[in-house]
Amino acid sequence: MNSIDEKLRPILAEVIRRNAGEAEFHQAVHEVLESLGRVVAKHPDYLDGALIERICEPERQIIFRIPWVDDKGQVQINRGFRVQFNSALGPYKGGMRFHPSVNVGIIKFLGFEQTFKNALTGMPIGGGKGGSDFDPKGRSDAEIMRFCQSLMTELHRHLGEQTDVPAGDIGVGGREIGYMFGQYKRLNNRFEAGVFTGKALAYGGSRARTEATGYGNTYFVQSMLETKGTSFDGKKVVVSGSGNVAIYTIEKVQSFGGKVIACSDSSGYVVDENGIDLDLLKDIKNVRRERISEYVRRRGDGAHFIAADKGSVWDVACDVAMPSATQNELSGKDAATLVKNGVIAVGEGANMPSTPEAIKVFQDAGVMFAPGKAANAGGVATSALEMQQNASRDSWTFDQTEARLATIMRGIHDTCHHTAEEYGAPGNYVLGANIAGFVRVAESMRMLGVI
């Protein structure tokens, strides 16, 4: 707490007291407040009217029971969450996550981060997040459908294209979005396409949405590298994860001339010094839904697999690291290894994948560091573009959508870069992102009054 301005310390202390045991939420609030000392020194009026305290408190938290019947006829019970964090800029917007680790603290951290991420896009969307402790792994399509329908039987009453617009996240892809939207349509008797994003193209989805988070992170890092007169071309890159974000990060890095030599899943990681075979990886993960070790068996010579208990993907020497799996996956020790091995840039494709210790190691070493709330904003930016297409009953080409995405991501980079310079910390993208996002949300909240 000593790194936080003394005027802001009571705010963090109260957040910790009111949200006991929610470590990820505490971490996210701490990181933002750490950046705001320079803001309140320059603009002390942001301390008036409990503005910062209100930003740290969700507008609404919904927790509910989800009963459903498995294929054996057994009744299962899961818990559902939707945290509608801040609507100062527009309807709540943020994904749904299905994973056993989900609890209210994780959803609050994600919703808090989403608020500032969405603000950075410049689009009229507020921040929210949701999910369940349901684990879709090993479940049949019928079980997942019944679960999604039960979840929406409660959640539908809290959603709407002008109220709250969910999307996908870990464990939630096009299949799950389809089942949830179908139940929403049944219960509301309206084809309200803009109430969900990440939909299939057949019923109102946007081209480039699947690719957007990975592509967007790559665009941001490319812009960051250009400030130092370099690019991805010829660089060795390590990407953690092997889901959508990781796969499309790899795809865009390769298009920029970079060589991705390692990726991972929860079982371990693979190293391929010849460069990851993207078509093979997509087949294993998107079609066959197999473990990453299968890549080595099918790739043959030149690739090898290391189990999760034998090492970390961050042990692999690279020029650029792009953590794209989950929160707090990259530790201070991992960061020190990357620095020792010559990393020059890090771009967060996941939400808060680097621990505070890791971020400090990177910053102290002069490594360019792109925080998730800025670098992975491409997904929600394209979701907002999907909402725009739905509202106008329009459909854009892939190239049109990607061009808008590229413009938005370069704009986010430039905003963070210039804001860091304005507040006396050139090159500090964490500070730039936190301040730029905060100021936009805070100004809107101030104009709306005490609500």
Image: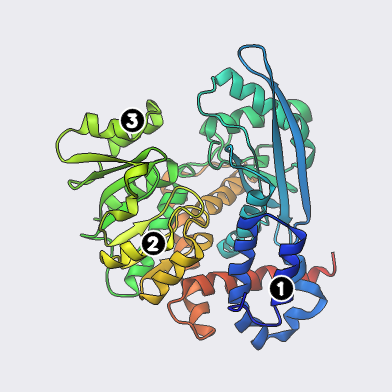
State the image quarter where residue 449 is shown: bottom right
Residue 36: in sight, yes or no? yes
Q: Amino acid at mark 2?
A: Lys
Image position of 312 with respect to 150: above or below: below
Q: Residue at x 46, y 61 (%)?
A: 409
Mark identifier at residue 443: 1
Q: Amino acid at mark 1?
A: Glu
Image position of 200 with respect to 60: above or below: above
State the image quarter where residue 187 is shown: top right
Residue furthest toward the left?
A: 301
User: For numbered disc 2, what is the local secondary structure?
Assistant: helix
Q: Position of residue 239 (x, y in %)?
A: 35, 51
- In whole angstroms, how far apart are the C-alphas of marks 2 and 3? 33 Å
The residue beneath circle 2 is 333
Q: Position of residue 385 (x, y in %)?
A: 56, 50
The residue beneath circle 3 is 283
Q: Amino acid at mark 3?
A: Asp
Q: Quadrant of the N terminus?
A: bottom right
Q: Residue at x 42, y 63 (%)?
A: 332
Going by the image, does 109 lie left or right of 231?
Answer: right
